[in-house]
Image (cartoon, rainbow, N blue to C red):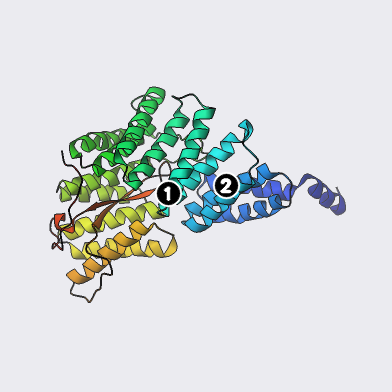
Amino acid sequence: MGTAALVAWIAAHDVGTIFHRVVGEIAVRHGRAEVAQRHLDVLVTASERSPERRRLAADLLALGTVYREQGRLGQSGRELERALEVLPDDTESDAPTRSGILSELTEVYQELGLPDQALASAEAWLRLAESTFAEGHVAVARVLETLAMVHAQRGSLDLAEAFQRRALSIRETDLGSQHPEVALAMTRLGHVLLYRGRFRQASLYLERSVSLLRAAGHRGERGWLPWSETRPDVSSMLASSLNELGLLYREQGRVGEAKVVYAEALGLTANAATERAAILANASMVSLQMGQVQEARHYSEEALEIAKKVEISPALRALLDDTAAEIRLRMGEAAKVVRDRDDPTVIGVASNARAYPMVEVTRVPRSSLRGVPPRRAVETSRRRD
């Protein structure tokens, strides 16, 4: 084939677009966000010139997802909102794309600390899922779990627990009691119970989850998520569960055990920047509670370096800033903590894998931090067991 004929064939068959689409999808599946973004940018530009709105919406969804993987939450939210706008009116064939957009958008709003927007998006997602699937379908459980976390973020803990228990029941029925996704659902329920101060119940679910995920990791299993093309490995799920378990141990005053589980979690998060930053922040607080200031500083500085490269939630930023200031005070350096001490102080951040990527905070009085000099105590409404 001559050069002119080859050029004509490429133009006729849109080989350039096919190439970018294939390479972009491969990069996404292998976690190469930077490579994926470059190819997806080209695809979006090409789709904008096409009258096919569904293709543009799908490409914007992929690009928004990659931006979130890079920690560029604001840009991610803009692309996802645009994807929702350009998608044609509701049709059954568009349900998977619309569901994917609402899923990602809900999680971006959560990470940005926008609970009202997250709730509206999650409720739209649930309506779509319930109209598409049977009540006990595992895809409905996925939405219920996200909605539970949105309500937890808003302080509606009764609703959060009810939604999460319903989701766990669906997953156990559909997948069996030993499945990694069931273990992760237990972690989410433990998270809500921890928020409610029901430590004994939280312990049952979190320790069971960690045990199941450790066993699954030894078997080399991988998780499976409906509505998603990604397959996060069990190590990412385990890191999230360990982080939650560490928060529980800290609340119970078991700081030595908390330190051990944080160390294990950090060993599993080398390539998960945002999640690693949250765990580092919690590990730093544990080291402070144990009087190990140099180690706390090491963890804090690594977390702050990550925060320079990726966009993190306001809650995590507040915790990092407060911890860094506490470390400077402990080391005799000048530090000014520009936070209102009449507010409860963040002492923990709960992060999750791609299955649940939101960042949450646990607030209790600073005076309850064992080993840390107390400041003004603030009443807490959380009920203890």
User: Label 1: few (<14), some or many (≥20) within 10 Å?
Assistant: some
Above or below, comparing residue 157 to residue 333 in the picture:
above
Q: Nearer the viewer, residue 19 or 201?
A: 201
Residue at disc 1, secondary structure: helix
Q: Position of residue 198 (x, y in %)?
A: 20, 39
Mark closer to the chain start, 1 or 2: 2
Rounded to the nearest whole Å, what is the CA distance between mark 1 and mark 2?
Answer: 21 Å
198 left or right of 239 in image: left
Picture disc at residue 116 = 1
Does the image show residue 270?
A: no
Three-letter amino acid code at the position of disc 1: Asp
91 relative to 118, above or below: above
Farthest-out residue, bottom: 334
Is 373 positioned to the left or the right of 183 in the image? left
Residue under pointer 2: 61
Which dot marks residue 158?
A: none
Rendering quarter of residue 141: top left
Decide if residue 249 is in sight here.
Answer: yes
Q: Residue at x 87, y 53 (%)?
A: 4
Question: What residue is at 83 percent from the left and 50 percent from the top?
Answer: 6
Q: Could you tell me which quadrant the C terminus lies in?
A: top left
Q: Quadrant of residue 280?
A: bottom left
Kind of residue sitting beneath label 2: Leu
Q: What element does badge 2 sit on?
A: helix
Q: Nearer the viewer, mark 1 or mark 2?
A: 1
Q: Residue at x 37, y 65 (%)?
A: 305
